[in-house]
Image (cartoon, rainbow, N blue to C red):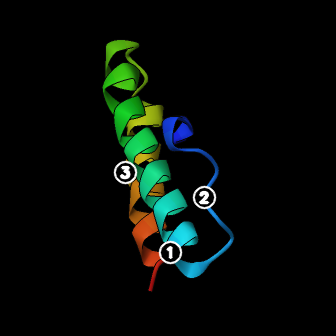
Amino acid sequence: MCDAYGVPAETEPGTWRRRVCEVRHLGALRPERHRLSDPAGVKDSYRAVAEEPAALD
């Protein structure tokens, strides 16, 4: 999760950045789950991605 940029600070912008990185990670997993023929994992990835931005409000 955004390892190249270091650990985000425990601030509001740091929390936002960490969640954006998590969504990017979850989005990257979706094609891999398609490739592995994991329909449950693909379906779950949509739920997981939808929950992350909601937490930013």
Quarter-of-image position of residue 9: bottom right
State the residue in front, 9 or 27.
9
Is disc 1 surrounded by few (<14), some (14 to 19) or many (20+) residues within 10 Å?
few
Quarter-of-image position of residue 29: top left
Pointer 1 residue: 13
Report the Cα–Cα distance between label 1 and label 3.
24 Å
Is disc 2 surrounded by few (<14), some (14 to 19) or many (20+) residues within 10 Å?
some
Report the Cα–Cα distance between label 2 and label 1.
8 Å
* Furthest residue in direction right, as rendered: 10
Quadrant where the C terminus sits is bottom left
Side of 13 relative to 39 (left or right): right
Pointer 3 residue: 46
Q: Is residue 1 above or below residue 53?
A: above
Three-letter code, disc 1: Pro
Mark 1 residue element: helix
Q: Position of residue 36 (x, y in %)?
A: 40, 13
| Residues tagged 2 and 1 counted as in contact (Cβ below 8 A) | yes
Can you tell which of label 1 and label 3 is closer to the viewer?
Answer: 1
Q: Residue at x 40, y 24 (%)?
A: 33
Three-letter code, disc 2: Pro
Side of 13 relative to 36 (left or right): right
